[in-house]
Image (cartoon, helix red, strand yellow):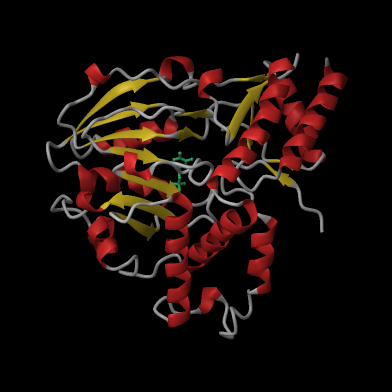
Amino acid sequence: MARVFNFSPGPSVLPESVLKKAASEMLDYQGSGQSVMEMSHRSKVYDGIIQGCESLLREVMGIPSNYKVLFLQGGASSQFAMVPLNLMTGSGKADYAVTGQFANKAYQEASRYGQVKVVASSKDKQFSYIPKLDPAQFTPDADYFHICMNNTIYGTFYHNLPDTGKVPLVADVSSCILSQPIDVSRFGLLYAGAQKNMGPAGLTVVIVREDLIGHAMESTPTMFNYKTHADNNSMYNTPPTYGIYICKLVLEWIRDEIGGLANMQARNEKKAKILYDFLDQSGLFQGTAAKEDRSIMNVPFVTGSQEMDQKFIAAAQAAGFVNLKGHRSVGGMRASIYNAMPVEGVEKLVEMMAKFEKENV
Ligand SMILES: *Cc1c(COP(=O)(O)O)cnc(C)c1O
């Protein structure tokens, strides 16, 4: 069996030990005689899986007890609507920082439900940086302030969180959740599609402060109301059962094999440094994100020539480094080096890039 080095932005690489464990339990989950996919979500055996997943997530992320963890579907994109439907019901106002395509989609969706202000944008330079935020621009009575913490397409990350005072900070953390420790108490709400760092596509995780639940707009669909899911422990309807099971295995891997989020961060920083150090000295490849805002999860880079970019992507693919093509909106290359990408994968990629450079300049 030959596994490739998979730099996909999502769905993305999973830890090999997780895949092996899932394979070994595929036909008979712990003596139940069933696959996790086949069992009732209301069975005692499944209850152990979903509760285990939630308590592991609370332990690994240090989620305070006044926050609910919700296991939903619909992707991060559904949260673009759920957040305003549930939270924009005080003053009916919200602030958004537009740092990329997903942040912009979130802003546009929220605009359908209330008075939404763009307090900062980095559109002027292709979203290649995190704009400085001026608190004088913030709406003092906003119901929340929304950021996209890691901009998957552009490879930028908020190394410093905005100080929004009493206004709850809401963050899309789809592509950085579990990559490093995060102080959950600084946020009103966090949401993430699971398919980058948590498990397979189909599961969306929401972490929300309890006092923000229960104020949804009257017209909010039942399934889009956080209260529905909070009151029913994510069991109002059938949750994405298999995705939650894989997420639990991923959390066990982080806790037991990696040793927690501080170690995860050290490993991720080591990987990112190998790649950025190479890019910074290369005569062929250049990183496109502002240095001070660089992400340790997504690393976009270019050669400056579309033809050379294509030649590189093809050569990489042939050598077993797949999904390095940049987002269709920006072109170039992007190496997504999520938690499950081994250090060896980045070392080998850089070796391959150096060899390509020698042969092509
Ligand atoms: C992938 C991604 C999304 C979209 O997630 P879906 O689950 O496909 O809706 C949104 N925001 C960020 C930051 C992402 O990386």
**335 with respect to 45 (left or right):** right
- Percent from the top left, x then y, of residue 158? 44, 29
Q: What residue appears at the point 20 percent right and 51 percent down from the top-left corner?
A: 211
Q: What residue appears at the point 42 percent right and 69 percent down from the top-left corner?
A: 51
Q: What residue appears at the point 81 percent right and 25 percent down from the top-left corner?
A: 354
Quadrant in which residue 164 is drawn: top left
Front-lying residue, 63 or 17: 63
Q: Can residue 203 be seen in this view?
A: no
- Give the quadrant of the N terminus: bottom right
Q: Can residue 149 be seen in this view?
A: yes
Extreme-right residue of the structure: 359
Residue 127, placed above or below residue 215: above
Q: How many labels does the image show?
A: 0
Front-lying residue, 215 or 344: 344
Residue 206, placed above or below residue 170: below
- Percent from the top left, x then y, of residue 291? 56, 19
